[in-house]
Image: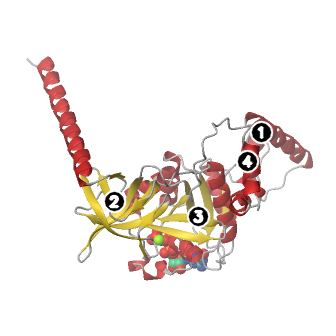
Amino acid sequence: MLEILDGLGVSYKSVSSTIEEDTVELIKQILEEEAAGGAAATTDAAPAQNQSAQPQSTQTAQTEAQSAAAPQSAATATAEREPEVAAPAAPETPHRAPVVTIMGHVDHGKTSLLDYIRKTKVAAKEAGGITQHVGAFEAKTSKGKIVFIDTPGHEAFTTIRARGANVADIAIIVIAADDSLMPQTREAIAHAQAAKVPMLIAINKVDLPQADPERVKTDLTQLNLVPEEYGGDLVVVPVSAKTGEGVEDLLEYISLTAELEDLRADPKGNFSGVIIESRVDRQAGVLATVMVQEGTLHVGDFLVVGENYGKIKAMTDSGGGRIKEAGPSTPVQVLGFSEAPASGETVLSAKNEHAAREVIAQRASDRRDAENARVQRKRTLEEMMGP
Ligand code: GTP
Ligand code: MG
């Protein structure tokens, strides 16, 4: 919208500035033309939905639930999709729950927002009231299962935020309405952009008397992130982790975004996952949080991470309950590694201990070869440059 106004040479001071009736008509025309152009470029009706400022409980959002309940509606949904996706008639890979990473500046209310969604009180129990690690949680919401990853906002935890963005399907940037954009807000946005993850903005703490959500929106436009109501495509949802205002809308947007991403994984496929975090517990030993991305993890499986392996002795879900197996989009805490695996590393499974050792031996040998090649290159270079 601001771009259009600039283009037309119309001056404005803020979002509440008034503009001439003729200008309004002109802008409408331009937007309609743009929308028409956008729709022609894709056969998917979804982008049009995305431009609406209001969360909608659209049919698409309910398709999955309906198809689970009524087989014939699943058939209709498939039939409708066929003309645009010329997919072979292979059995469809099942949908999986979205992994949503919450990022933002320190104290803007990320953990509180998750507490509201999960009906927990994690924020109140944190040392010094700040998050110092990632937490991965499964939440049963009105929109089905959503996996949330909470990240710290303190400036010291840049790497944790970057990793959080990398495992995400969707990033939620939490911005406090009384504080607007702060250094780690900008950093979080940059991580989401670098990871090419769709981003939703939650303007939190709108219950505060000094809350100024409009300022947050104008500040966002400075970063070329234009909220939908200003004519851009950025979804901005005002929320309060204290009163719960707007939280349902946020969940609705998450579910719509997930639907557009068409997230799928095969629980019967080969297992792969990623290490979210790991720590050494004095009594239990090494505890690693693994996000299952493909396939299914079982107690007794052998896992390989880098040049380290372990046999799963026990597994707990994010609620702390013992489980025997875990499918796609499930964060689990795994007991069984002898050394703490590095966060962000890929995890694969091996048939047995022998196979696990073989994979590791191969990786170690590849690494030595690469190192030798590097030394060799350096030597050759030195000889060439020699006296
Ligand atoms: P870090 O993890 O350290 O980056 O902080 P955080 O973003 O997780 O913030 P946290 O949830 O710990 O909340 C920080 C403070 O803001 C706490 O005192 C919360 O009670 C308060 N707070 C969070 N959300 C809201 C809200 O919507 N309204 C009000 N009034 N206070 C809130
Ligand atoms: Mg926190």
Q: Position of residue 34 (x, y in %)?
A: 78, 38
Left or right: where does residue 240 sit relative to residue 76? left
Q: CA distance from mark 2 to mark 1?
A: 48 Å
At numbered mark 2, what does the secondary structure look like: helix, strand or loop? loop
Q: CA distance from mark 3 to mark 1?
A: 33 Å
Which mark sits nearer the N-terminus, 3 or 4? 4
**What's the amino acid at mark 3?**
Ser
Q: Residue at x 47, y 78 (%)?
A: 122
In this rendered view, identify the residue nearer to me: 105 or 165. Answer: 165
**What's the amino acid at mark 2?**
Asp
Residue placed under numbered mark 4 in the picture? 46
Q: Which of the two discs, 2 and 1, sits closer to the camera?
A: 2
Which mark sits nearer the N-terminus, 2 or 1? 1
Q: Position of residue 56 (x, y in %)?
A: 77, 60
Quarter of the rendering containing residue 7: top right
Left or right: where does residue 321 sit relative to residue 45? left
Quarter of the rendering containing residue 144: bottom right
Residue placed under numbered mark 1 in the picture? 39
Category of crowding for the residue at label 2, using alpha-carbon neighbours closer than 10 angstroms: few (below 14), some (14–19), many (at least 20) = some
Specify the label residue 129 is tagged with: none
Q: Residue at x 52, y 68 (%)?
A: 138
Residue placed under numbered mark 2 in the picture? 301
**What's the amino acid at mark 4?**
Ala
Q: Position of residue 140 (x, y in %)?
A: 58, 71
In this rendered view, identify the residue nearer to me: 111 or 130. Answer: 111
Which mark sits nearer the N-terminus, 2 or 3? 3
Q: Which of the two discs, 2 and 4, sits closer to the camera?
A: 2
Q: Residue at x 50, y 50 (%)?
A: 190
